[in-house]
Image (cartoon, grey):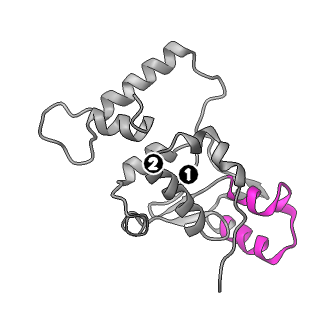
Amino acid sequence: MATKRFTDAEKWKDPFFENLNNNFKLIWLYLLDDCDNAGIWNKSIKRLNFHCNTSVTEEELYTIFKKRLQPITEHKWFIPKFMEFQYGVDWINSNNKAVISAYKKLEQLNIIVDNTLSIPYQYPIDTLKDKDKELEEDTVKDKFKVKDTSKVKGQLTEEEYNKIMYNGKR
């Protein structure tokens, strides 16, 4: 059965999407197309890299999309805004068969509990001041920095990190 989805024509003006490099723009579109009707993506980095002709790691993927993707199991990731965008603001009370099917999937994964979305909120309510943002950015850079010239598996060089995070503009 063919799956059809709504797409947001305004995404090209969204600062998040606008600041992604072309590979990550393609990956984001792929994730939205490859997830099921509940916004659950059966994680396959190998398949993603094949279809998008990229070579991203799971760590890079999570770093770039951590505000847009929520790991819920080792093999499943959830796109929290997917349901509202595809089915409308009041989707949770819908009698549409597609929505009911998606709702049941979310219940089975304990994403919906007692008719309420139950995903842990990842971000603090208070926003960081500029100095704190710079400190946090330096901490993240240090986390991905390779100390020796021999590259350690799973770590990025500072150049690779900047290319991913700043689209090569830093």
Principal SS element in the magenta part? helix
Q: Amino acid at mark 2?
A: Tyr
> In the visual, does 74 lie left or right of 106?
left
| Furthest residue in direction bottom, as rendered | 1
Q: Which badge, 2 or 1, is on the more N-terminal residue? A: 2
Residue 60 position, x and y percent, is 39, 47
**The residue tagged with tag 2: helix, strand or loop?**
helix
Residue shown at 43%/64% (left/top)? 52
Q: Which residue is mark 1?
A: 70
Q: Nearer the viewer, mark 2 or mark 1?
A: 2
Q: 74 or 144, which lies in front?
A: 144
Magenta-drawn stretch contains 86: yes
Residue shown at 47%/50% (left/top)? 22
**The residue tagged with tag 1: helix, strand or loop?**
strand
Q: Quadrant of the C terminus?
A: top left
Q: 108 or 16, which lies in front?
A: 16
Residue 70 position, x and y percent, is 55, 51
33 relative to 139, above or below: below
Q: 22 or 49, which lies in front?
A: 22
Q: Amino acid at mark 1?
A: Gln
Magenta residues (range):
81-106
Residue shown at 44%/35% (left/top)? 166
Magenta-drawn stretch contains 160: no
Q: Which residue is mark 2?
A: 62
64 relative to 84, above or below: above
- Crowding at label 2, few (<14), some or many (≥20) Cα neighbours within 10 Å? some
Residue 87 position, x and y percent, is 79, 63
Residue 146 position, x and y percent, is 21, 34
Residue shown at 35%/54% (left/top)? 57
40 relative to 142, above or below: below
Q: Which mark is residue 80?
A: none
Mark 2 to mark 1 CA distance (whole Å): 9 Å
